[in-house]
Image: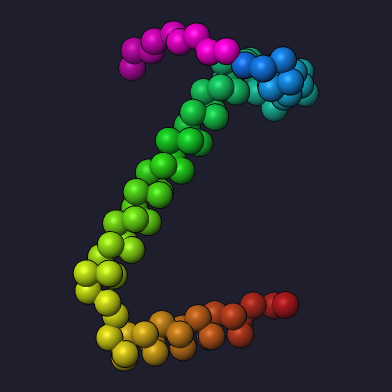
Amino acid sequence: MTTEQIAIRLSEELLGELDALVASGVYESRAAAVRAGVEVITTLEHRRQIDRAIVAGYRRTPPTAVEHDAAVASLRDAIAEEPW
């Protein structure tokens, strides 16, 4: 995989937080921390796209009353099984 270098500007405050993460060993370098942040952002956006597609599907074809009741029953069972 080829990579490409980019330049970014950060506020002093954000850069200080980034450097603290590197200094504490959370990330091995500034680049590794920024790369991890970009990966998180892209993963979240992909999940949002999937969520929007699911919502659109349910809007096109809403669940029947039987499906709704089954979903509610399943949720109740799952909650009842929680050890709280």
Q: What is the quadrant of the C terminus in the image?
A: bottom right
Residue at the image point whose x is 48% and y is 35% from the top: 41
What x and y, as percent, mark residue 76? 54, 85
Is residue 61 rendered to the left or right of residue 12?
A: left
Task: State yes or no: residue 23 in magenta.
Answer: no
Q: Is residue 11 visible?
A: yes
Q: Is residue 32 above or below residue 64?
A: above
Q: Is residue 47 above or below residue 63?
A: above
Its colouring scheme is rainbow
* Residue 59 lies in quadrant: bottom left
What x and y, as percent, mark residue 69? 39, 89
Q: Is residue 23 above or below residue 75?
A: above
Residue at the image point whose x is 34% and y is 12% from the top: 2
Residue at the image point whose x is 72% and y is 15% from the top: 12
What x and y, as percent, mark residue 80? 61, 85
* Residue 81 lies in quadrant: bottom right
Which portion, as a residue range, is magenta? 1-9
